[in-house]
Amino acid sequence: MSRLLSQLETDLKTINPQHIYGKVAGIQGMLIEISGIESMLSIGDRCFLIGKGKRKVPCEVVGFRSGAALAMPYGGLDGIGLGARAEMMDSEPLIRPDPTWLGRVINAFGNPVDGLGPLKQGDIPYTIRNNPPPAHTRNRLGGKIDLGVRALNTFTTCCSGQRMGIFAGSGVGKSMLMSMLARYSSAPIIVIGLIGERGREVQEFIQEDLGEEGLARSVVVVATSDESALMRREAAYMTLSVAEYFRDQGQDVLCLMDSVTRFAMAQREIGLSVGEPPATKGYTPTVFSELPRLLERAGPGTGAGSITGLFTVLVEGDDHNEPISDAVRGILDGHIVLDRDIAHRNRYPAVNILRSVSRSMPGCNSPEENEIVNKAKGFLSSYEDMAELIRLGAYRAGSNPAVDEAIHYYPDIENFISQRSQEKSDLQTGYAELAQILGMVQGMDEE
């Protein structure tokens, strides 16, 4: 009771008894100049523009120029003109998550968009843009987490609190892989951020890919591609804030975000609007400063809980060294590469095992498990080195014993990696099946 009273007192102090208004002094594109209250505003503050018919458009202050505050809207600017009033919001944006949010779909403001009524508000407020926990207070990675996908469980094993990137071009199977992770992973709580997603695919993902069972343990945050850059960026922050709440409740949370690239594009749009200089491929400097601030919020916590993050990266032009891919790969604890050539061979998920890395391996595995993985990777590597000659029929059997052995095992390993979207695979079964394919069953039994 005392904690609730203390929190109520804190909240009451944030309420401003006065209504403070400025006015719109200029509009250029989606950038609004607000004068009259610029000295009372700071970066990140929110205000309402009041237009025709008393329509209120929420905005966020993104910069200052020539004595005026620069704001961008969260929605359309219809009905807003010169001289329109700009009303300051009473307090900083907060959310109050609650365990009853599981099974719900919310927007970037934390408001429900699933038609199931209002959300229950919890006792503890969370700011949208929290800072990552201090590095020296964070725990180390926990034990292995079962992702339900054979290729990832065995070849890119992930631990609780680890952050992994899923890198792929368009149409290679990122969304399908994400849906398999959401359905089949062993995580008790899942927070899913659909950032800049196609509007028609949201319901398909929730009803078909996620399903009732998956949704029951999930919170879905949605900002579709037609929404403003601020809404798309805010949805990414909201996803991590909800995940942090459940982490602080001692839960091991799986945070899925599709995609980090669209978050970066939204930040680029905002930066260019306020006059930031474009750097590589037009991405502004704040893009590369905001990426680590967002991604570092996932990971081990300071208490019992953790956030295991899997973030998709849309690789432009299949160039895995383009700026966002390169920056994200340097921040995260591993990367899963989906290969278009593999998808063209009709093998899904199209994970390129040889190009994918988990930085928690091999430390998280037993020596026997590492031996199985290394042997399978060796066969894949030997086969890929001679793949062109083998497919052309130019390789002569007996020329290289290692290649001959790789050719023998390759079809079975490829079949092992392949997995239907309706099929679930657990962690230990995956190692056992791979050991059987490689003729290493005896070694596993001895373990």
Image (cartoon, rainbow, N blue to C red):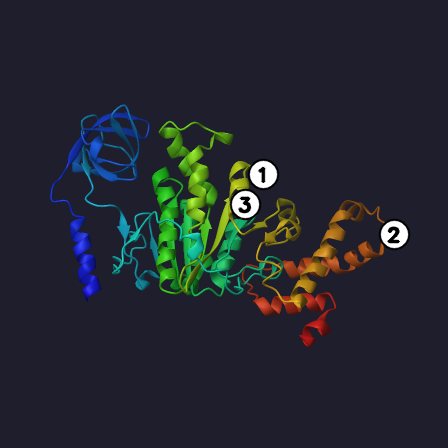
Question: Which element carries disc 2, helix, strand or loop?
Answer: loop
Question: Which element carries disc 1, helix, strand or loop?
Answer: loop
Q: Classify the position of the N terminus by image quarter.
A: bottom left
Q: Residue at x 26, y 40 (%)?
A: 45
What is the residue that sits farthest to the front in this orientation? 136
The residue carrying mark 1 is 321
The x and y percentages for residue 105 are 35, 55
The picture quadrant where one finds residue 119 is bottom left
Q: Disc 2 or 3, which lies upstream in sequence?
A: 3
Q: Is residue 206 above or below residue 292?
A: below
The x and y percentages for residue 53 are 16, 35
The x and y percentages for residue 346 are 64, 51
- From the viewer's side, name the closer residue of 315 and 288: 288
Q: Disc 2 or 1, which lies upstream in sequence?
A: 1
The residue carrying mark 3 is 329
Q: Is residue 284 above or below residue 175?
A: above
Q: Which amino acid, mark 1?
A: Asn
Q: Which amino acid, mark 2?
A: Ser
The residue carrying mark 2 is 399
CA distance for labels 3 and 1: 9 Å
